[in-house]
Amino acid sequence: MRTNLVRGIVSTAIALTFTATAAWAAEMSVDSQVGTLLDNPDSKAVLEKHIPDFISNPQIEQARGMSLRSLQTFAPTLTDDVLAEIDEDLAEVSHEH
């Protein structure tokens, strides 16, 4: 009985982790939190490609809870064109997983 309970808990935990990871990857965009994008190696690579100086700035840590789109008013490097390119690459990364 106890073994079945442990197996059930482990199976549920694995399923929830997979579901959360898949949903997290599927939702990556310029509207995602910067912290979420930085914590994922694939999305961080996209940011490094498009806005390396922006994300290497130590103050980026203060923006972890904000989206790139919401930061656009504070950062002239985040033009509509740049955000569109980032969004396109993030969509590709999201569909790879």
Image (cartoon, rainbow, N blue to C red):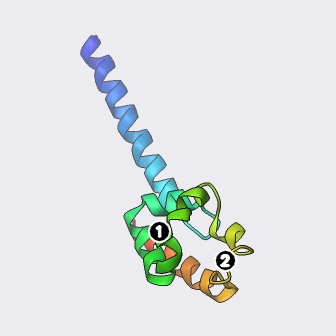
- Hey, what amino acid is under mark 1? Ser
Q: Is residue 30 above or below residue 27?
A: below
Q: In the picture provided, is 67 more to the left or to the right than 9?
A: right
Give the alpha-carbon distance from disc 1 to disc 2, as whole Å. 25 Å
Does the rendering let one see residue 65?
yes
Judging from the image, what secondary structure is the residue with disc 1 in? helix
Which amino acid, by three-letter code, is at mark 2? Ala
**Image quadrant for the N terminus?**
top left
Q: Is residue 80 above or below residue 71?
A: below
- Is 39 or 58 nearer to us in this picture? 58
Question: At x 75% / y 74%, what residue is drawn?
Answer: 73
Please name the residue shown 32% across and 30% down the image.
10
Q: Quadrant of residue 74?
A: bottom right
Q: Is residue 13 above or below residue 53?
A: above
Residue 6, percent from left and from top: 30, 21
Rendered location of residue 14, percent (x, y): 35, 39
